[in-house]
Image: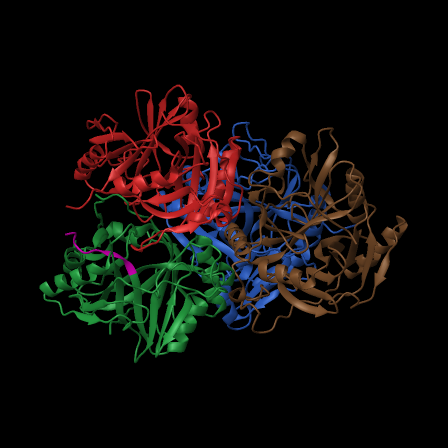
Chain colours: A brown, B green, C blue, D red
Amino acid sequence: MMPPEIAKLGHVALVTPSLEDSVWFFRDVIGLREVEREGDTVFLRGLRDWEHHTLSLTEGDRAALDHVGWRTRSAEDVDAFADRLTEEGIDVTRLEPGEETGQGEAVRFRIPAGHQFELYFDTDKPEPTDERRSRLKNRVYNLADASPVIPRRIDHVNVHGPDVTATHEWLREVLGFRMNEYALDDEGDRRGGWMSNNSLVHTLAYGTEKGANEATFHHVAFYLDSFGDLMNAADVAREHGVDVEGGPGKHGITQANFLYITDPATGIRVELYNGGYQIFDPDWEAIEWDAEEAAEGLTWFGNPPNQETIPVE
Amino acid sequence: MMPPEIAKLGHVALVTPSLEDSVWFFRDVIGLREVEREGDTVFLRGLRDWEHHTLSLTEGDRAALDHVGWRTRSAEDVDAFADRLTEEGIDVTRLEPGEETGQGEAVRFRIPAGHQFELYFDTDKPEPTDERRSRLKNRVYNLADASPVIPRRIDHVNVHGPDVTATHEWLREVLGFRMNEYALDDEGDRRGGWMSNNSLVHTLAYGTEKGANEATFHHVAFYLDSFGDLMNAADVAREHGVDVEGGPGKHGITQANFLYITDPATGIRVELYNGGYQIFDPDWEAIEWDAEEAAEGLTWFGNPPNQETIPVE
Amino acid sequence: MMPPEIAKLGHVALVTPSLEDSVWFFRDVIGLREVEREGDTVFLRGLRDWEHHTLSLTEGDRAALDHVGWRTRSAEDVDAFADRLTEEGIDVTRLEPGEETGQGEAVRFRIPAGHQFELYFDTDKPEPTDERRSRLKNRVYNLADASPVIPRRIDHVNVHGPDVTATHEWLREVLGFRMNEYALDDEGDRRGGWMSNNSLVHTLAYGTEKGANEATFHHVAFYLDSFGDLMNAADVAREHGVDVEGGPGKHGITQANFLYITDPATGIRVELYNGGYQIFDPDWEAIEWDAEEAAEGLTWFGNPPNQETIPVE
Amino acid sequence: MMPPEIAKLGHVALVTPSLEDSVWFFRDVIGLREVEREGDTVFLRGLRDWEHHTLSLTEGDRAALDHVGWRTRSAEDVDAFADRLTEEGIDVTRLEPGEETGQGEAVRFRIPAGHQFELYFDTDKPEPTDERRSRLKNRVYNLADASPVIPRRIDHVNVHGPDVTATHEWLREVLGFRMNEYALDDEGDRRGGWMSNNSLVHTLAYGTEKGANEATFHHVAFYLDSFGDLMNAADVAREHGVDVEGGPGKHGITQANFLYITDPATGIRVELYNGGYQIFDPDWEAIEWDAEEAAEGLTWFGNPPNQETIPVE
């Protein structure tokens, strides 16, 4: 039997102390589409996301990461992963279909570093109203209805936490993440790694400052189709009076054109991401950037975001 | 005394047999801002136009060009041009302030080829509501309020008519247009010229098929800041079910990146224009493109618009 | 045991009646890097291709497709595919390591429609000279050394041939291609399909005019990182006196921004490709475009390439 | 008689302590074309500059600004300006034709703030070799011959010095510069102004930190046609191991997309400039940005360059 596999990053579930502010930020400034509200949770997605939601915002005491949802390759893989995790001594919680709106059976658990992950396969497919539907059958939402900011789809999530090397190894062994690039600190220890389950150069970045022992969240990234859209996004954010925290610029590692904007009400950070590269070669060897190389690898040009993070729930 | 001068293309006044369709086209598809309605006329402008309007649409029997408005360098230049035109035997009609909404004193007349021109200096400056105003003091409208189509300002007008060389000469002598580039036909006669009153490579294109003796209108152009915006404009037009008649592409002559879209209800054509070049050298010598050179000069790459035109009123 | 899988499109091997002209076209106009010459064959690749070559040009009697090379997920998959193909009654030819320059063991065969395919896993990794190597460790060639045309990597190949539906089915069953989008003709029969082995919306397009019974080659596509690069590519081609046959434009199907340019000496066509979209959802259902929908799906805007093809060797 | 007028910024003449390093920087990194060498001076220009040179580099003891050349509207204007300057008590030095390579009669003088300006009309027009000439008759150099950095033309010069308000006034009164935008400091005094002689929002920026009493040079700017080219320019600079000092980003004032890169050997700074806006309205009122507004007006987004300058010769 084939080992279970994660197919893609599904969604990021965030907690916000100011739900309406955050909805305004992600919908009106960043341009995501509001899909549905259920209780104190609002579900959103990009213009070309083919899932029920790729971001959720739930009212809570403080800004925090609730969980990161990963879509498996098949329905069976959810169970197979659950078994595997249980063998590893991880507590697994099962969710019934619909317990998370728009989603089928799922399991939730904490990785050893402390972040809550979720695995699921079934998701309601987008069915926008005729008015909002794109005339292109392979695109979800109508572009005519967009602002100049056009977030197409979720791209990756970046979390911080302790035990960088051990966590990378655990993610590889248990969840099957492939390491594509990693950076070392002055002492030759890993300070971060860019891992993936598909051709994207990363779906998950995991790293931290040395000695940090708290699991935190740095940003979730949405993909834009062009650098022009990214420039327009920066311009629109400023029109809204929202600062552009980092970028425009280009990472060397991942080769991404980036823009970082932070929800002013909550400190939740989003990266608008364009370009990057993809890995189709099955024998890709992880690229190591030593401390000196990493300095320019992290920021090839442009100003980087700051390193403040928000906690995990 | 200095001779009177035209400072810029001010606006194009069009007649449409289907006012609401044309307003939908220019406002919702092309992205111009609706400024004001007065009687059966709707006034619009781009996001960075500093005049009351740069396009007007008036209900009428058929699609037609009513007039092209040119802003002079000073208020005195309006009178000076009127005197000059009268000397040339041209009938000049005077308009009182406000006779054309948002505009001061003006004169209207027909150039020998048959198109009605208007000269004016005073214009109401844009005062958008706080909600629509840009946070940038040097931009009129808020970009956050735009669709992915972002027409910044009027650029030029393209008309067809008889007597190409003679008309070019008249425009130069009487109105001061400088010839920047012109194209010849197989017999060595002029088939078109790109003329300007300022640093833009053209504010007015005048040409035609040989032997044509009707004054007509081919298109009005609005400037977009980037080629990415032009691609988004094409995409948005298609989402609206509107065809892209010409482009994306690049003219050799003028070096413009172009997109041509025609109001499906009326046949009124608009060019979305990006790039081009500017002439700051006062001793610029008009560039001649012979018939063979003009073939690629007209369309450096991409598919050109068709040559159908609409009449002048 | 897991079924063998193709990981990616590896290379396209073309025959040209005018080797130096074609090298000039692909290297100087299109911007590929020349890797090596061996006998009457020249090997090239893009600036971020991680294989020995992604295009080869061999001197021959006429322009033709020799073979399309596909890289498997593992070395074992080459043998597994060979067995599978033999079971299907397909003649399989084995190549020793190095028999194709820079490549390990491989097998070649003709798909039932007549095109020669090649499967291999081992390939020499790029080792550019220090002078040409990028300072970015995850990019092969130095960008400072490029022209304004910057082809990053091979993207897909487009071939024509008989028996569209049957061929699609064979490619799926035997080689594991997933169908992502397909178009129907007026009678409801398939006229083309866009298939893939990875997250790219297509690595192989297979279709044809109804009743055609010849296996031919339409184009090979290379990916550019931005639409601006694509515009520069068109401009550079024209500076070289080379026509832009199709585009700039956008396909609805695949959502690609496209530019088609044909080697004037040989008729070999290349697509410069930007954008597109990716499929990460494992339960993607192939999108069907009926004849009417396909009309705008094939060309969302911009002028398409013509349908002339070159034969297979 | 019409008062003399400056038509455009002509060129910036710089002194470098390391001529070959600076030539490498401006030619190989920034992409200007080398036109000619005469003695210890190298002349360069952009791909669409219509003058003999728009930048010169002369070997000298230290990095410094020698002079800024301005092209007048007519040959007579050079003399008329000379008379005017003499009346103002300014020492004027006359240059014979050819004394500055490629240039006709000229006058040089120091503005009261201390920078040397030059006025001239006649200039040799570009006559590139057939190999380098563009196939477009309205473009100078062939784009196929360019790197991904494509500097089209000189745009503006930015100098620092004492007496900001008085200098602005002098430039207006004596040389005819129009003030388009200016910024105030906390005490309500001018800290900088953006002035122009044509439709460009600025051809000259003059400002400084309060109390500064030294005339210095901050940067010369070249225009790129697209933001994509600007991103490629940043990437290419980094491939050369050259830092990107400021940007990519966007100024609010001038609305320019910017990139600042400094010659590592000499500290001479260049801005690569895209976008901006143009002023065609003859009654433009200078836009005032108070200290608070100026903060975001100066940098709408992206990281700004530092404020180090080099002296004037």
Numbered-mark total: 0
- Residue sticking out furthest to the bottom: B61
Write the start and end of the magenta stretch as one range: B1-9
In this view, the residue in front, A266 or C184, is: A266
Q: Is residue C236 left or right of residue A148?
A: left
Q: Quadrant of the C terminus of chain D?
A: top left
**Magenta-span inclusion, residue B8:** yes
**Magenta-span inclusion, residue B3:** yes
In this view, the residue in front, B190 or A69, is: A69
Q: Position of residue B176 (x, y in %)?
A: 19, 55
Quadrant of res D164 = top left
When the figure is inspected, residue C137 is found, relative to residue B173, above or below; the finding is above
Q: Is residue A170 left or right of residue D240?
A: right
Q: Position of residue B170 (x, y in %)?
A: 15, 59
In this view, the residue in front, C240 or D310, is: D310
Q: Is residue D302 left or right of residue B272?
A: right
Look at the image and tell me whether residue B123 can be seen. yes
In this view, the residue in front, A200 or C244, is: A200
When the figure is inspected, residue A203 is found, relative to residue C41, above or below; the finding is below
Q: Position of residue C312 (x, y in %)?
A: 51, 50
Q: Position of residue B201 (x, y in %)?
A: 29, 51
Quadrant of res D205 = top left
Look at the image and tell me whether residue B307 can be seen. no
